[in-house]
Image: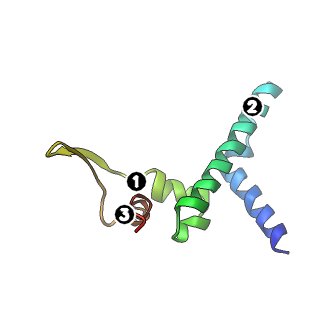
């Protein structure tokens, strides 16, 4: 029964990523867009399985966008080093630090 639920979850993720919309009148343009959406969905799934160890591993694309992809940060230079400053209270900051420093 779990395989069926996983398939439904994958279809729901694709629909939330924009696969439910067909914006072009041309079939070739829509098929190319669908192939790119499927490829991006596979890349996000691979990233979640290999890099994330927190609750974001099973998160929906909307939550990933809100907490990880759109994380506000500032790139600063100090003492000839490039630093990335993250907001400490942001929910995705700890997940991003866990990716960068897995120990």
Label 3 close to label 2 by CB (< 8 Å): no
Label 1 close to label 2 by CB (< 8 Å): no
Quadrant of image for the N terminus: bottom right
User: In this orientation, which residue lies closer to the viewer: 61 or 44?
Assistant: 44
Element at badge 1?
Answer: loop
Label 3 close to label 1 by CB (< 8 Å): yes
Residue at 79% across, 69% down = 5
Q: Residue furthest front?
A: 103
- 43 relative to 20 in the view: left or right: left
Element at badge 3?
Answer: loop
Q: Earlier in the sequence, mark 1 or mark 2?
A: 2
Identify the residue position indicated by label 3 in the image.
90
Q: CA distance from mark 3 to mark 2?
A: 36 Å
Q: Earlier in the sequence, mark 3 or mark 2?
A: 2
Percent position (x, y) of residue 13?
A: 69, 56
Residue at 39% across, 66% down = 94
Neighbourhood count class around disc 1 (C-alpha, 10 Å): few under 14, some 14–19, many 20 upward: some
Q: CA distance from mark 1 to mark 2?
A: 29 Å
Neighbourhood count class around disc 3 (C-alpha, 10 Å): few under 14, some 14–19, many 20 upward: few
Identify the residue position indicated by label 1 in the image.
71
Identify the residue position indicated by label 2 in the image.
32
Would you place residue 57 above or below residue 36 in this image? below
- 91 relative to 31 in the view: left or right: left
Q: Residue furthest left?
A: 79
């Amino acid at each position: 029964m779990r395989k069926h639920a996983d398939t439904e979850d994958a279809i729901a993720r694709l629909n939330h990523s924009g696969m439910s919309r067909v914006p072009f009148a041309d079939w070739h343009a829509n098929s190319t867009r669908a192939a790119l959406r499927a490829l991006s969905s596979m890349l996000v799934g691979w990233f979640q399985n290999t890099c994330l160890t927190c609750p974001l591993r099973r998160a929906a694309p909307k939550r990933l966008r809100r907490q990880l992809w759109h994380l506000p940060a500032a790139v600063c230079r100090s003492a000839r080093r490039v630093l990335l400053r993250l907001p400490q209270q942001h929910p995705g900051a700890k997940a991003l630090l866990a990716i960068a420093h897995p120990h």
